[in-house]
Image (tube, grey):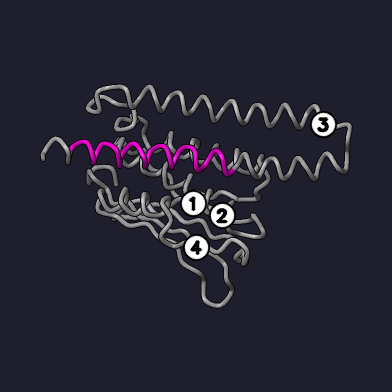
Amino acid sequence: MEKAERLATANLHIAAEIHDLLGHDLSLLALSIEVARITTAKDPSSVDHVLESLAHRARSAMGSLSDLVLDLSKDQSTSQLQLMAKPFEDVVPLVKEIVISANSAGLEISFACPDQTIITEDTICNAIIHLAKEAITNLSNHSVSNKGVFTLSKSSKGIHLELLDDGPMDTHNQRNHQGAGLINCQKRAQSLGGYAGFSLVSDSNKGSFTAFIPWINSAAQ
């Protein structure tokens, strides 16, 4: 029975990691293809450049998948999935790179990080990156405008993340508030004593993805 429970837990972990990785990359790839269709229709001479850009994004997704498979084959006590030893001062540029990559696929997201701090808690760093990717995936899949404002900030209690999209909701692709990606984010944040969630802002039908991860080590504040 204990072995079965460990296997079930491992399977859930693998499923969550694969979803978080491929869900983000494939959403951006699909968006890139839509942008490519419009671009090449307006400028047929751009076909070669556009196709190479799509191929590069696909190769990047495959590379990420290969890294994930390699990590999952390791002892989980030393897996890079659990150990991302980068201080917060390095995580900010990483999150910014995620936003830039999303914008190159066709989104229009501005990035703001008004407060800088140094943090060595690798678990928080890992969570921030997963949460950032899911927030952007949610906007890509469900916001008609594909525009938003991504804010990463700190307080005395922890790290705050918000992606406010410009709405409105795609009525042909209704937002699923209990989708696998959001559930994964909620579990990841809750495991660290925080929270993650999505909500519509008043009557504007704009979406707000918010998350909070508390400090693990008070010295990092």
Q: Residue furthest bottom?
A: 203
Query: What residue does disc 3 label?
Result: 47
Asked if the residue under mark 2 is in contact with the one under mark 4, i.e. CB atoms within 8 Å, the reply is: no
Q: Are marks 1 and 2 in contact (CB under 8 Å)?
A: yes
Q: Which mark is residue 208?
A: 4
Disc assigned to residue 139 = 2
Instruction: Farthest residue to the left: give it.
Output: 1
Question: Which sits earlier in the primary sequence, circle 1 or circle 4?
Answer: 1
SS state under label 2? helix
**Mark 4 residue crowding within 10 angstroms, few (<14) / some (14–19) / many (20+):** many
Q: What are the residue bounds of the magenta stretch?
A: 6-27
Q: What is the distance, in whole Å, between disc 1 and disc 3 at their CAs?
A: 31 Å
Q: Earlier in the sequence, mark 1 or mark 3?
A: 3
Marks 2/3: CA–CA distance: 27 Å
- Between disc 3 and disc 4, the foreground one is 3
> Mark 3: which amino acid?
Val
Q: Amino acid at mark 2?
A: Leu
* Residue 21 magenta-highlighted: yes
| Discs 1, 4 touching: Cβ within 8 Å | no
User: For this rendering, which residue is in front, 208 or 218?
Assistant: 208
Residue 27: x %, y % from top left:
57, 44
Q: Amino acid at mark 1?
A: Ala
Frontmost of labels 4 and 2 is: 2
What residue would you read off at disc 1? 135
Q: Is residue 24 above or below residue 81?
A: below
